[in-house]
Image: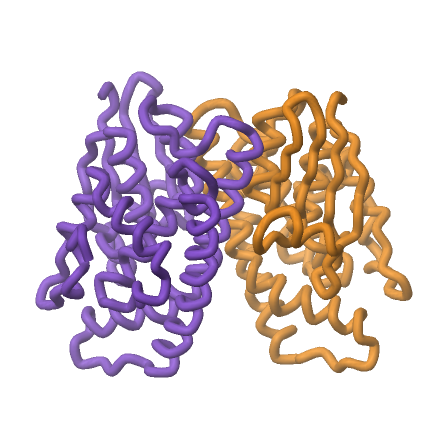
Chain colours: A purple, B orange
């Protein structure tokens, strides 16, 4: 690689996970800098007004490039780096992959805000009681999203078609974060479970499966490829 | 144009407005089909599982192409149609335009859900009282977004840099919808007001300024280019 890349991210943030999967799929080496949502790295706010992690900084022949957020980073990587296509080449398939990538990001927002954030904040402030109403609401939304994704995978093989795309990596990024806490009922979604076992065994997934929160072990099957 | 394009949209939906601006900037002729959120056109659900307007269908040399949602449609138009660039060509500027486009769409979600939806639903069901708490919350969020956009425009000239991009068209699409009801306090954001007067005078904006809800006149300055 000609570029020096640095990624500001937090290990269990689904947006940061999606970017790490894309960097992995493209074979881009990068320096990772932790920037947790409750205590962002001071560099991040200086990158651009209102910037929050994930943020990618590259130095190379093209000069200094700053890309912030999944939409900017993942499209930039697909446009600038050879290797696995993150989006299909056919315009119609490309549009469908982007539609479902956007669907995943919008649809999991409530899951992240309620379920994942409660789990994480309980870990950050150890004395804090989780808000059981939020956990319940997040779990309910998650079940709906799982049902939809299972139906898509059953018909298409992958989320948005025959080939893996950003729709799959985004879904896997979100599911892997809640799966750390054991919140995914895989038994209820057999087709999605097969799809997840397949995507989980890709080399790009390995760093995510190695993530560990201090004093919170992941669910028994979190890093198990044959769960 | 070689393509026959059909757009399913609803006139005051900011997402549909963004797509109409992009089609206008690219000079793409299209047939418009109304699909209001509270009564979607039956075609839309058949286009793709879970699809909602805006949805673009094109028939042409490349076959049948369906693009649903702003991320899929706007990127598709920029990739496939010559004319005004919706995203800058330099990778760093491109990333910044996509970051702020995503920021606008995420940041105005609450404005749409609270302020705009209340205004529209009051019009749809004439006997319904608006939820004043939602209106208040929506107006508060809108003020914050306006302040940020004003600061960006003051520094950059446009939202994401020197040139107009999807970040500007997305912001203008959202602002124009709430401006129909007179909910934008332009006096508080003088730089943004100058920017909006400029973008409003583009030919691509004319169809939006001609939109009228039956029995609800737009705010006095809605279609005024010199407001």
Q: Nearer the viewer, residue B188 or A154?
A: A154
Q: Tell me residue B11's x, y (percent).
A: 77, 52
Residue A130 at x, y percent in the picture: 28, 80
Which residue occupies 41% across, 29% down?
Answer: B92
Residue found at the far right of this picture: B215
Image quadrant assignment for residue B140: bottom right
Percent coordinates x, y for residue A104 in the rendering: 45, 53
Q: Residue furthest left?
A: A215
Q: For this view, does A5 lie left or right of residue A91?
A: left
How far across and how far down the image is residue B192, in percent?
A: 63, 47
Say if B47 sits above or below B40 in the image. above
- One can see residue B154 in this view: no
Above-or-below relation of A112 to B41? below
Towards the viewer: B215 or B221:
B215
Residue A165 appearing in the image: yes
Residue at image position (74%, 55%) is: B42
Outermost residue, top side: A61
**Frontmost residue, B154 versus A163:** A163
In the image, taking residue B49 as reference, residue B210 lies left or right, namely: right
In this picture, is B89 found above or below B54?
A: above
Left or right: B117 with respect to A68? right
Identified at 55% across, 51% down, the residue is B105
**Which quarter of the rendered picture does the N terminus of chain B lie within?**
top right
Q: Residue at x 68, y 67 (%)?
A: B117
Q: Quadrant of residue A125?
A: bottom left
């Amino acid at each position: 690689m000609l570029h020096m890349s640095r990624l500001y991210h937090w290990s269990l943030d689904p947006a940061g996970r999606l970017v790490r999967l894309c960097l992995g799929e493209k074979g881009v080496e990068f320096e990772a800098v932790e920037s947790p949502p409750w205590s962002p790295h001071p560099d991040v706010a200086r990158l651009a007004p209102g910037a929050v992690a994930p943020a990618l900084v590259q130095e190379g022949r093209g000069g200094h490039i700053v890309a912030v957020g999944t939409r900017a980073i993942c499209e930039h990587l697909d446009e600038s780096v050879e290797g696995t296509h993150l989006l299909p080449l056919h315009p119609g398939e490309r549009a469908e992959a982007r539609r479902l990538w956007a669907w995943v990001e919008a649809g999991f927002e409530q899951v992240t805000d309620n379920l994942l954030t409660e789990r994480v904040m309980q870990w950050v402030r150890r004395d804090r009681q989780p808000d059981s109403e939020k956990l319940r609401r997040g779990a309910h939304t998650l079940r709906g999203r799982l049902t939809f994704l299972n139906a898509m995978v059953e018909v298409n093989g992958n989320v948005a078609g025959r080939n893996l795309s950003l729709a799959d990596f985004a879904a896997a990024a979100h599911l892997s974060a809640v799966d750390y806490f054991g919140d995914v009922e895989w038994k209820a979604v057999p087709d999605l479970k097969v799809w997840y076992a397949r995507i989980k065994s890709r080399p790009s997934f390995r760093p995510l499966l190695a993530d560990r929160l201090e004093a919170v072990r992941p669910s028994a099957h979190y890093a198990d490829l044959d769960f």
